[in-house]
Structures are given as structure tokens and as C-alpha cells.
Image: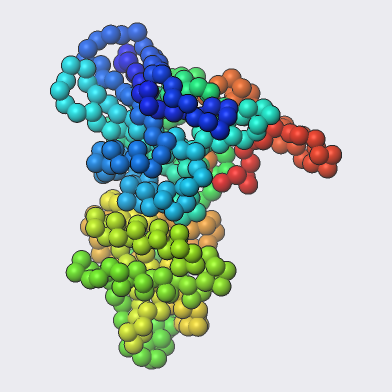
Amino acid sequence: MSELVISLPSSARLAPATDRVPDRPAVTVRTATTTSPSVPTYTVDVVTDRAGLESHRVAWDMLSSRAAEPNVFYEPWMLLPAIDAFGGSTSFRIAFIYRSQPGSLAPRELCGFFPFEIIRRSAWTGTTVLRLWRHQHCFLGTPLIHQDHVAAVWHTVLNWASASRPTPWWLDLSHQSAEGPLWPALLEVARQREQTIYPVEPFHRAVLHRAEKFDRYCQQAMSAHFRQELRRKRRRLGELGDLELRVLEETDRIDEWIEHFLQVEALGWKGRESSALASSADQRTFFESMACGAFARKKLHLMGLFLDGRPIAMKCNLLTAPGAFSFKIGFDESLSKFSPGVLLEWDNTRWLHEQTEIHWMDSCAKPGHFMIGQLWKDRRLLHRLLIPTCRRGELALAMRPLLHAVRRLHRQSGAPVAALPSKETP
């Protein structure tokens, strides 16, 4: 049996019951009695502020390319701009899980990355929760775990959470894939530990799995009438002027493409409701920084429909082989009768079938999204995982349905009821 050692450095700070976060001494948890020098050691480094992340960046980048399940939203070029823009009031507990071999001169290897935030759900009960941080533009919460060390990392993070002081009542992992290798590995780890996991709030969203041929995929995913209608709209749109599909190239000026995208996205309902990326300085800065970082790493794919040189539909994809994520799309609603956004999404489907390293694309769309549902035939299952880390958490989650009913009964009377996870909680 292997030995997992969790060591929190003295500089690590864990959330107390008050707002002040004192330093704590090292905490070590051993899950086996073997003392074999050949057994690897797993160490958890906890970072609580933005500055502390920089020293892990090289290892973090390397882990992103070796993750069992890719997640662009937790890669450094995406997450760091997001923290700068949206993480100002967040109480971070970002866990880096390193593996080292006793007696070896080789450097530690980063095997796990969990960007937790600590949530104080109820002052009067002392309930605290470790939740994977997600901002408004983060559409997947899968942690980065090295493909060769999945089970060991799950064991380590569960041990670390249980050993933290004060101990969080549970881990809250939202937007987790129920189809990749992390979920069955976690189930097996839970079985070995006799650990209860509560999967809640399942939902499906569209995903595109590349077929052998683009035409064949279209025949399987779309009706003949729908394909004919798309071709008709493209012809009619082309009658208005010179219609051109452009794709970002390595030699292009990224700032011009970013400006085109922000301009087009603001032309629709997002602009009217002030939810477009260009609607606020923080969101604009986030997108500009993120896009430039992705472009430098060849992980940004921008494409657009241009009419007489003017952008009328723009799409932003984020690449992390063997997958990709459809991040944002925008179009000029004054041309909505020609469906430029749908036409661009059709072009995007064709583009994916021309790739060799990208095999699938997550739509990042809401469940039941009408437009993408017409074009992409496959769905992926995601859910939220609640994992108790102490007896109080186990009891609270086991009683969750009953306590939710009690809370509803007490709303009119104004009596206090313990805060519990709900569908309204992001």
C-alpha cells in the first residue's frame, strides 16, 4: 500500500472562523503505515493570493498539457486574468498538489490543481465550504489532474481538506464532467475510503464529436430541409455584398481581431443588457489579456463572417488538444433574417472537421440551447458534486432534502434555517 503524505507549509493559510487568516504550522496526514523509501510523497501547497501563483506557473502550464481531462478555464493564461478581473473579494485557497520521490534529486512534479475558494455559508452554525471557484465566463469546473496520478491526487485532496483547520463541512465541485476518467476514478477512491459523494443538479449541453467527414456529420445531425435553408440564407446574404469567411492567422494583428469581436458581440442583446464583454472595463481587460495569452500559446481560434470588409458575425474558440471550447459568439442583429450567427457556427463545424489534433468541441451553451441544438447532435453530461469532509458535513448533506423542506416552511415566519447547497447557488 502506498503512503500519501500531505504537508502544508507554514506559509499556507487556512480559513478561520474570523476574517483574519493566521499562519498555521505544517499539517501531515498519513494514510498508510509503510515507510518504504520508494513510495512517492504528495505535498499540498496552498496559495491564498494572486502574487503567490506566479512561482507555480511553469509547472502549472506543464500540468495543463498532461491533464487527464483538459480544462482551458483553469489554465494559467485564462485563470490569472479572471482572478485579476473578478476575484478581488474572493477568499482563495488554491491547492497545488506536488509529487516527489524520496531520495531522488529530480524536482517535484505538479500533479493536481484545485482553485478553491472558502465560503462561510452560515455564521451561527460555523458552516464553511471549500468550493471550486468559477467566474461568470467559466463554463467548466473540472480540476487539472495529471493523467498518470488521478487516484493519488483525489486521495490527497480529500485528506488535505479533512485535515484543514477549521475543517470545511464539504467540498463543492460544480460543472464536473460525468463522462471522463476523473469521475470513475473519484468513485473508486470514495469506495476505498467508504466516502459518500452526492452528485446533484445533472444537466446536458451540446458537444460536437468530429465525424470522419463533414458532409456525413451534417447528414446525421441536421435535416435536409435545414441544410437547404442554410444554403439559401448564405446565398441571400452574399447578394448584399462581398461575403467572406476569415480565420485568425499567426501573422495577423491580434488587437484588431479582439476589437472586431468586442464590437460585434456588443451589437446584439448582450450590448443592450450591458452584459457584453465590452460593457465594462474589467470584462474588456479580462478578454484582451486572456485572448492575447491564448494567441501566444496557439490556443486561440477566432473566425468571422465579413460583409464588404465589415464583421457581421464573430466566434471565439479556445483550444486544448484533443478538445476545444466554444467560448463566445456574436452577430449583427440587424441581419438576423439571414442568420449570420448560425451560418458562422456551421462554418465552425466544417472547420473542426478539417482539424487533425482537435476531436471534439464543447459548446459551453446552456442546456437546451435552441441554435446549437439544431447543429450539433451529441450531448455531454455534467453535474455538481458535494463531498463531505467531516461528520457534520455528512449529516448536513444527508439531511439536505428534509432541511430544504423545513427552510421553505420557515420562510414566512422568518425563523433562521441553516444555509445549505441549493440550485440557486452557483
Q: Is residue 15 above or below residue 288?
A: above
Q: Residue at x 83, y 42 (%)?
A: 412
**Residue 420, how many percent across, how many down?**
65, 35
Nearer to me, 156 or 179: 156
Q: Is residue 407 above or below residue 8?
A: below
Asked whether, in this view, residue 278 is left or right of residue 360, the answer is right
**Residue 312, how many percent across, how many down?**
41, 79
* Quarter of the rendering occupied by the N terminus: top left
From where the camera sits, is residue 244 visible? yes
Rendered image quadrant of residue 282: bottom left
Q: Residue at x 19, y 28 (%)?
A: 107
From where the camera sits, is residue 149 visible? no
Nearer to me, 272 or 347: 272
Q: Residue at x 44, y 21 (%)?
A: 24
Q: Residue furthest left?
A: 105
**Residue 67, how many percent across, how many down?**
30, 40
Nearer to me, 328 or 107: 107
